[in-house]
Image (cartoon, helix red, strand yellow):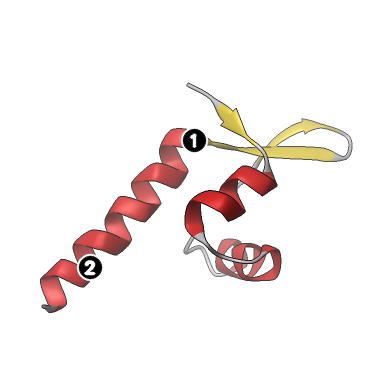
Amino acid sequence: MRIIRLKDVIDSTGLGRSTIYKYIAEGAFPKPVSLGERSVGWVEGEVHDWILARIEERDLVE
């Protein structure tokens, strides 16, 4: 299990910071893990699973 920071999440998903936090608020994106008072990260596997789910949704539509 690996924790990745926001820059890596942005690079992996292609989403912007505000969109990521909007999706989190809507319950549509994995929640971050607190790493300290002012630091968060995401579980890499959860972000990867989210990306795979978007691909599956796309393939079901086609």
**Within-10-Å neighbours for mark 1: few <14, some 14–19, many 20+:** some
**Within-10-Å neighbours for mark 2: few <14, some 14–19, many 20+:** few
At a point 22% along the width and 68% down the height, the residue shown is 57
Nearer to us in this view, 31 or 48: 48
Horizontal and vertical percent for residue 20? 61, 63
For badge 2, the amino acid type reads Glu
Whether residue 27 is situated above or below residue 50 in the rendered picture: below
Left or right: 44, with 5 as reference point = left
CA–CA distance in space, label 2 to label 1: 20 Å
Horizontal and vertical percent for residue 27? 51, 63
Residue pointed to by mark 1: 44
Furthest-right residue in view?
A: 37
Nearer to us in this view, 3 or 10: 10
Residue pointed to by mark 2: 57
Whether residue 27 is situated above or below residue 39 in the rendered picture: below
Q: Quadrant of residue 45?
A: top left
Quadrant of the image for the C terminus? Answer: bottom left
Left or right: 22, with 49 as reference point = right
Element assignment for label 1: helix
Whether residue 56 is situated above or below residue 42 in the rendered picture: below
At a point 88% along the width and 35% down the height, the residue shown is 37
At a point 14% along the width and 78% down the height, the residue shown is 61
At a point 66% along the width and 63% down the height, the residue shown is 21
Q: Quadrant of residue 46?
A: top left
Horizontal and vertical percent for residue 34? 73, 35
Element assignment for label 2: helix
Furthest-top residue in view?
A: 1
Q: Name the mark on residue 3.
A: none
